[in-house]
Amino acid sequence: MALTAMLAKDSADLQAHEALEFSSGGYHYEIKSKAGESSYSVTDGTNTFKTSLVWAFGSGPVGQTYLFERVNGEIFEARVSYFDALQGLDFTPMLVVNSAGDLESAAARFVGPEERVRCFSCHATGSTIAGRFDERPVALGVSCEACHGPGRRHADTMRMARMEGIEEVPEKGIYNPAELGPADAMDFCGACHGAMWDVVLTEPKGTKTVRFEPYRLQDSKCWGKDGDARLICTACHDPHKALERNAEGYDGACLRCHPSSKEEERVTKLPGKVCPVGKSKCVGCHMANVYIPEMHHSFHDHKIRILRVASTRH
């Protein structure tokens, strides 16, 4: 999560490609990177729009999106993004330009004040002061305080406890999301990873909702009416560690609800049934890998279910 945002000049993806090019709808897009700077230009063959990229959002196997700032302080999102699967550029999801029109509109999309707060709140730490975006104190990437809040009081509290020889500190002066109930925990993670309201407001359909993992997880039959702590995000993912990419790594979480054998099923009160097919790599069968064309990447569907062969239901 520390790599969710960075300065464009620090982007390994950009620095690995001296020139990235893409053409569509009568426009030619180009990002050139040299000497720690990345310039972004768009031309319609007659006129050219050119600027320097400032921020890069995203890192890893999917891709990276870019933002820049105009002289008046307004922030814009580039119409093209880098996708690792392509080793090149394509339209930023939901920002496709179908035909020639206004050059600046074809080059970028304006990011308004409210959206600016939401974007940087999920990709950086300390970007919002009194409800307003302020880039001066921002720490790029998601750090401890993004989830736990300001840490000064906590640090002072624990320092004083050590000085006074106090081993058990009941009030540690820090916000702990682990104390949230199932539904609130999902909303907490969903604030950045996609909760129900994100689906309601952005209206994605079908496979596009697969990217909203908390929403999809709550849509699982075993979530129930009020939720289950064994199904919240942190039941499978430790936010303090790198993402586990081996399917076997999640078997333990599945076995908190499902017995591993008929014998265990008889003697335990686990709510799930024993799987008649497999004993490991549960997510490979029950969390489909769904390819999303506009992302050029496959995502694990967090709607846990029994998948049918050639099923297209979402």
Image: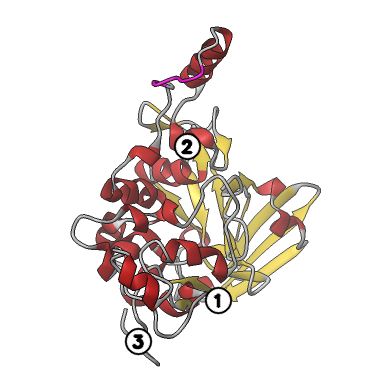
Nearer the observer, 1 or 263 = 263
Picture residue at 59% right of the left edge, 63% below the top: 63
What's the residue at 68%, 71% (across, down)?
A: 87
Where residue 238 sits in the image (x, y, percent)?
A: 51, 50
Quarter containing the C terminus: bottom left
Q: Is residue 81 left or right of residue 314?
A: right
The residue segment tinted magenta is 167-171
Furthest residue toward bottom: 310
Residue sitting at x 22%, y 63%: 224
Residue 129 in view, yes or no: yes
Question: Vertically, is 224 above or below 56?
Answer: below
Residue 149: give x, y in percent of width and height.
Answer: 44, 30
Circles 1, 2 touching at the beta carbon (< 8 Å): no
Give me the disc on residue 312.
3
Q: Which mark is residue 146?
A: 2
Numbered mark located on residue 24 in the image = 1
Q: CA distance from mark 3 to mark 2?
A: 37 Å
Q: Secondary structure at mark 3?
A: loop
Residue 47, numbered label:
none
Q: Which badge, 3 or 2, comes first in the chain's sequence?
A: 2
Q: Amino acid at mark 1?
A: Ser
Q: Characterize the local packing of mark 1: few (<14), some (14-19) or many (20 or more) Cα atoms within 10 angstroms.
A: some
| Residue 58 image offset from top left, x and y in percent | 57, 55
- Which residue type does callout 3 highlight? Thr
- Give the color scheme: rainbow, by chain, secondary structure or one colour: secondary structure
- Where is 146 relative to 29, above or below? above
Q: Residue at x 46, y 57 (%)?
A: 236
